[in-house]
Image (tube, rainbow, N blue to C red):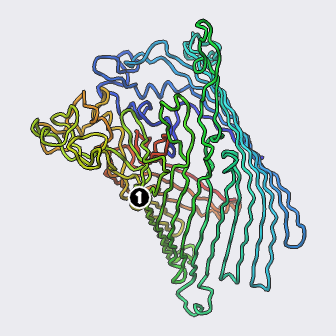
Amino acid sequence: MQYSHIRGYGFATNPNVAGSYQGEGSPIGWAYRIQTIIPVYDIMGNFGGSRGSGLGNADNPLAVLYRAKDNVNTDNQFFGSAFADLNVVKGLNLKTVYGVRYDNYTSINIGYPNPERSEGSYDNNPLNEAQGYATEWTWTNTLTYKNKFNDKHDLTLLAGTEAVESQGRVVSGTGNNFFIFGDINYYYLSAASKGLSSSSNGYVSSLFSVFARADYNFYDKYLLSATIRRDGSSNFGPNNRYGNFPAASAAWRVSNENFLKGVSWINDLKLRAGYGSTGNQTIPSFQFLKRYQSAINSSSYPIDGTSAASGIWTSNYDNPDVKWEQLKSWNLGLDFAVASNKIDGSFDWYSRKTTDMLYPVPLPAQGVGGGASPYVNIGSMSNKGLELTLNYHHNSTAGKEAFKFDIGGNISRNVNLVTELAPTVKQQLYGGIRSLQTSIIVPNQPFGAFYGYKITGIYQNAEDIDNRPSYADARIGGPVYADISGPDGTPDGVIDANDRTVIGSPHPEFIYSLSFNTSYRNFDLSMFFNGSQGNDIFDVTRYYTDFSAFDGAVSTRMLDAWSPTNTESMTPSPYRNRPALELQANSYYVQDGSYFRMKLLQIGYSLPVANIFKDRIKNLRIYASGSNLFTVTKYSGLDPEVTQFSSDFTAPGVDLGVYPSSRQFIIGLNATF
């Protein structure tokens, strides 16, 4: 049994996933938006803010961080397992493993008045408190048979079952207007004078699987493996609860064949091939059932004109046909080592097709009202690619005093494409941020492709507006959009929603990495680099800093914006009351996101301790390291290593003001006893 306790204070970020630390209401978002004329503190030592004429509505980012100082989040996890292993007969084993995980978590978030903000107040000091738990148990039973025949045939057969059950529940409450500020011991929901509310929710799911596997090895030359799984999930209805997922692989170690025994420069050569199918069932529970709720503000009505009669309403619509998402993969590979193992590497080709992708497609509001749309199997997607790894080792078997180094490189290319959508789904726009919709899922385009108007120029004068395709309220200095299409599928001289098109892809042409490790006597040096080439980034922050959706900070890019004396510029001129189409997604937001980054540099020295501590300490090494030391990129945002924006669908490459990867310096000591 193991136990872990995590306690977090204040404002937290996780750059690896989407979250509340990014976006227009985050400290990073406020830093983009707040007027640069506003000081951090005013002359009285209080926080400066946007309360004033023409200063916008941004909050002071440092004030936001400071006022989160009393936020506390805790997480307590217990996890462990027990097993029994019975040797039934020689070569036949029966094993059972039971594992359990229990997670108990709490959060307390306290807000303080922010009167310095234009939209702030003196009496806004909410308390949000939540407590929940999550449990999961897993019971696995396997019967394994192993045998080796005639010192040539190695056979392993396995059959088993696995059951998993998960459930959780969380209760939360909020209150506002507390009598005493700053005393954490006073902040209880019962002490709030207004705004009291509470809610709770939970989940339950289960999975049952039967599986079998066979592995065969002949003389370490020919290797075969086959697996079959049948998984049943409570997330799907009776008609589609179970899915079958086979897999098989084969390998041929060519270097062990007699016809290569005399080829001394080939040390290892293996060919691989494989096919596999896996399932995805990670969706909210009970999507196949229509669910109802009863609430005063949603399903009560004064039928007799006096008192409210309680009723029910459809809170979640159903999809009884929802089923497993499947990923089918084919791969071919080659592993090699040559020249006395000085050079080694691998080459892989793969083709992966995802069918019946699971996503919640919004239904028309007039059809569902306030009810939530169910998950549906929206369509299919393919990923095809190549990956090459190559390493060189110099003098790796020499003595301790020798100079050694290893150089390695990896490059991979993946081509992503949405191949088809369900008959009821022509395309799916998503990634909504105010008037922007950043991304689209549409056949024959990459998943999450950027979608909007393509800028081809700037309107130079009134005659230019009259003689070129234009839109309502088009202005001098405004963007010229390409006339892509009209209602009948051909350009019609009018710019409207029909002229939106794919304007970029978040998927790189290739990604790569380089590593270098060397040692000389007691010194060692390690370096690691990585990069991405050919991907685009949709920089949402320009909505505020370049298109002035709100009063606030303005980018220095606007110093080179179009003007009567700077007519060659492709940056639309500043304009506070832009027409609606200017504030929609367009190619001005899309930038090249390619980068090359030094992820790690570490220098170490192993002290000669053998004679000092009389073998009590076998090794003592001091080191200094730095991470994210430099980045080469043309991207103008904080960090080109953008992950994704969490919307109804995953929106890769959308930058709402992502928290940048931090540069770290570490000095450490390693000791081996």
Picture quadrant of residue 293: top right
Horizontal and vertical percent for residue 174? 59, 20
The mark tally for this picture is: 1
Horizontal and vertical percent for residue 451? 35, 46
Label 1 Cα neighbours within 10 Å, binned few <14 / some 14-19 / many ≥20: many
Q: Can the viewer see residue 125 in this picture?
A: yes
Horizontal and vertical percent for residue 27? 43, 32
For label 1, the SS is: strand
Looking at the image, which is closer to me, 359 or 522?
Answer: 359
Residue for point 53% across, 56% down = 623
Image: 114 above or below 477: above
Looking at the image, which is closer to me, 102 or 530?
Answer: 102
Q: Quadrant of the C terminus?
A: bottom right
Return the residue found at the far top.
Answer: 306
Mark 1: amino acid: Gly
Looking at the image, which is closer to me, 148 or 662?
Answer: 148
Residue for point 73% across, 71% down = 214
Picture quadrant of residue 116: top left
Image: 552 above or below 414: above
Q: Can the viewer see residue 2 in this picture?
A: no
Horizontal and vertical percent for residue 670? 61, 56
Looking at the image, which is closer to me, 252 or 321?
Answer: 321
Return the residue found at the far right.
Answer: 89
Q: Which residue is mark 1?
A: 531
Residue for point 62% across, 11% down = 308
